[in-house]
Amino acid sequence: MTDPSPRRSPLHDVHAAAGAAFTEFGGWTMPLRYSGDLAEHAAVRRAAGLFDLSHMAEILVLGPGAADALDAALLGELSTVAVGRAKYTLLLNGEGGVVDDLVVYRTGEDRYLVVANAANRDVVVDRLRDRVVGFDAAVQDETDEVGLIAIQGPRAEEILLEVPAFAVADDADPTEQHFRESIAALRGYRFLRALWDGHPVLVARTGYTGEDGFELYAAPELLPRLWTVLMDLGRGAGLVPAGLAARDTLRLEAGMPLYGHELTPLTTPQQAGLGRLVRRDKAADYVGRAAVEAPEAEGERVLVGLAAEGRRAARAGYPVLAGDREVGVVTSGVLSPTLGHPVAMAYVDRPATGEELAVDVRGSRLPVTTVPLPFYSRKA
Amino acid sequence: MANAEDLQYTADHEWVSADGDIATVGITGYAAEQLGDIVFVDLPSVGDAVEAGQVIGELESTKSVGELFCPVSGTVTEVNEELAAAPEIVNSDPTGAGWLLKVQVAELPELLDKAAYDALTGAA
């Protein structure tokens, strides 16, 4: 069982000293903002932001049967993922609904790191334990032993490469130069195992902001020092500490779904715009397969992007209207800091997606246009 | 910026500054900080009759929506037009350039002084 009182990040004192306002999220007390949501958001788009993601759940699946066990447990075909690569995938229920979205890193032939949302830690651990029964594999909840920070933004790589004392782990060439070349060559959704001052750090080119960047997994007690070094070296390049408020507006502009908003146990991958994750050629059977391969999985309601004029945001829970009919509901919405106009994601009845739509903003009608997701994508 | 000691406050985190029968109304620095970056301010129109305790507007930040409760009764004589284009002034100068509206009042209600308001927000 997870402790019911909110837990503190190993970086809590560092955040407090930096003037952070805190919020409770997924059973943790985490930084909501430091200087201000908009400044932090803009810094990530233009330079870089440093995020504390210690609340995320890290779960190991290991053993000779780990690959087959995950193939049976998850939507994705994890057995085909090469060591050193990561995959975004979903854990489904038997009805094809989304229990959680996950990033899974293959850290060895017999070893995977599954990263889940904080609020879903227990349910993901429980489901994985249920589903590996019969395979030669074990599930270990490592959340208390693994911390996570992310550096995101166009200058993230440059700042990371400034940090001294990094080396590629288990490599014949332990020099800083070799680490820097390896990071520069690292492509998206790939990672390498590194040592920082002798301590293991998994450096992954992944993120949740729509920008280039890295996620750094390490022992919790290592994080305050690593955070401080990154901030000290990056400040001149525009690096700022960024809170969960900015993380939410960044991921929303990038059209990335958030569990509890766009993803729920009652929505299928196809409804959420994640139909590409359903591979009919996958060899193994998996929980939810029959349901997501059935025509009904397309669903009556589908996730759409909405854009509006003005400055008033459509927010989660607001009804979507076609004429006087309620045809959907907003799942996330904000005045886009980058674009300067309101954007939202909403579930809308399929036949209504081509109609003229509006959102009921606390009694007043906000006309909206259906637009493709994402709202924002970085220049290649 | 107005001297914080000269303002009166409400438990809903508005402040009032009286000059004759004109009351200037804004939100406190505490309220602005709780909201986060304010991106939209919805205010009544000049000439509107307003009543104390009534919701007369909204302040939206990236993360939330705050209702503006009118602390006084009377007629709106002026609204801060600057805020349409630059709502962030409410964050940067909540008790000065970030004022919201002016109301012509028959009489000022008894509101909280600074010490009582600070006690409410837990400020030292």
Image (cartoon, rainbow, N blue to C red):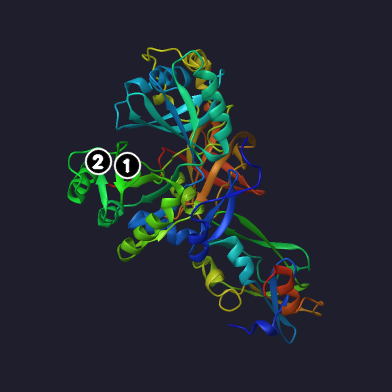
Task: Farthest residue to the front: give it.
Answer: A198
Residue A209: % across, % down: 40, 46
Residue A205 numbered tag:
1
Q: Work out which quarter of the rendered image holds the C terminus of chain A and state it.
A: top left
Residue A96: % across, % down: 53, 20
Task: Farthest residue to the bottom: give it.
Answer: B20
Q: Amino acid at mark 2?
A: Leu
Q: Nearer the viewer, residue A93 or A161?
A: A161
Q: Are marks 1 and 2 in contact (CB under 8 Å)?
A: yes
Q: Nearer the viewer, residue B84 or B71?
A: B71
Q: Is residue A161 among what the camera can see?
A: yes
Residue A354: % across, % down: 49, 32
Residue A109: % across, % down: 32, 24
Q: In terms of sequence position, does the residue under pointer 1 or pointer 2 come before the other?
A: 2
Which residue does the image show at 45% across and 12% down from the upper left? A285
Q: Which residue is mark 2?
A: A186
Relative height, residue B105 to residue A89 (above, below): below
Query: How many numbered marks does the figure carry?
Result: 2
Which residue does the image show at 32% across and 21% down from the upper left? A80
Relative height, residue B65 to residue A292 (above, below): below
Q: Work out which quarter of the rendered image holds the N terminus of chain A and state it.
A: top right
